[in-house]
Image: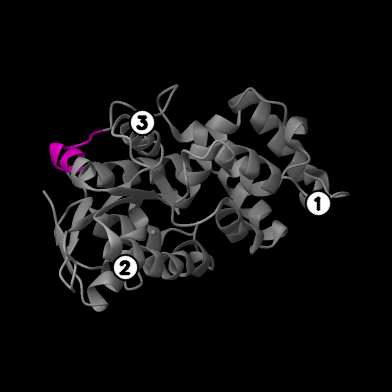
Amino acid sequence: MLKRIVPLLLGVFGILNTASAQKSLLWKISGNGLNKPSYIFGTMHMICPTDYFMSNSVKSAFKSSDSIYMEMDMDDPMMMIKVGQLAKLPEGQSLEKIFTEKEYQDLSKYFKEKLNMDLKLFNGFKPFLLQTLIAKGYFKCETPASYEMDFVQMAKEQKKEVKGLETPEDQVGVFDSMPDKEEAKMIMETVYKPQEQINDFNKMVALYKKQDIEGLYKLMETSKKAEGFEKELLEKRNNNWVPVIRKAIAQKSTFFAVGALHLPGPQGVLTQLKKAGYTVTPVL
């Protein structure tokens, strides 16, 4: 279960993030005293195999890099256990106490009819876990593909260590910073307006396939899903990541893979790197 949940958890961050108008998911970082260029690639954490693609440029950049970073250390065998532990509600709390009686009943019905799951199995877990499970219903395919899992496999084959820009505690902490009632409200909007969520998701997939990170950013800006939560989801995490990125690329050529929505925007990783003096160029 956790092996399925972790990529979906990442996917939630992706659904909810401008350095250049050029369309590309892969960007080269050079200049500012670097001996070798590094690369950063924008992923869509979960995507149907029919929509999945990986260019030779991405494979070449990955192969030429000495170090690999993702949002979390995805090859850490303890990571999934940590996420599972962090996802648990404190003693004495339960989903039944967070949602209203009607919301819980409607949510339980949704889980049974749409996901073929018993909501009671997750009664002791934090609300964000429900959103990761609900997100599975957005996909047209039974088994979505994962760029992160493929990069982990590529790193293993090329005998390269995978590192994380943040810890499981950091990532789960983003959701912990949001009041449970607010999370519950967001979840029920998904339950009550499923087609609206699916339509937004399909728009995101279409933009991703066009490698249009500017379009993704504009879509996020018009979406209510990240309203009032953008700073936690994007800006604070980007601000925390950039120093880690700068330290890593100063030491060796590094390939970074993060959710595509972290790349664009005034506080996006690309813009921050450019302001720090690096040359950031798209790789087609």
Which amino acid, mark 1?
Pro
Label 2's element?
Answer: loop
Give how far across and how far down residue 82 sits, in percent: 64, 44
- Which residue was labeled with disc 1? 90
State how far apart marks 1 and 3 are (Cα).
35 Å
Q: Is residue 243 above or below residue 139?
A: below
Magenta part of the protein: which range?
A: 53-60
The foreground one among 157 and 192 is 157
Q: Is residue 100 magenta?
A: no
Can the viewer see residue 166 in this picture? yes
Q: Residue at x 45, y 21 (%)?
A: 142
- Which residue was labeled with disc 3? 153
Query: In the rendered picture of this protein, how many numbered marks are placed on residues?
Result: 3
The foreground one among 200 and 2 is 2
- Which residue was labeled with disc 2? 265
Main SS category, magenta section: helix
Which amino acid, mark 2?
Gly
- Locate the N terminus by quadrant: top right
Nearer to us: label 2 or label 3: 3
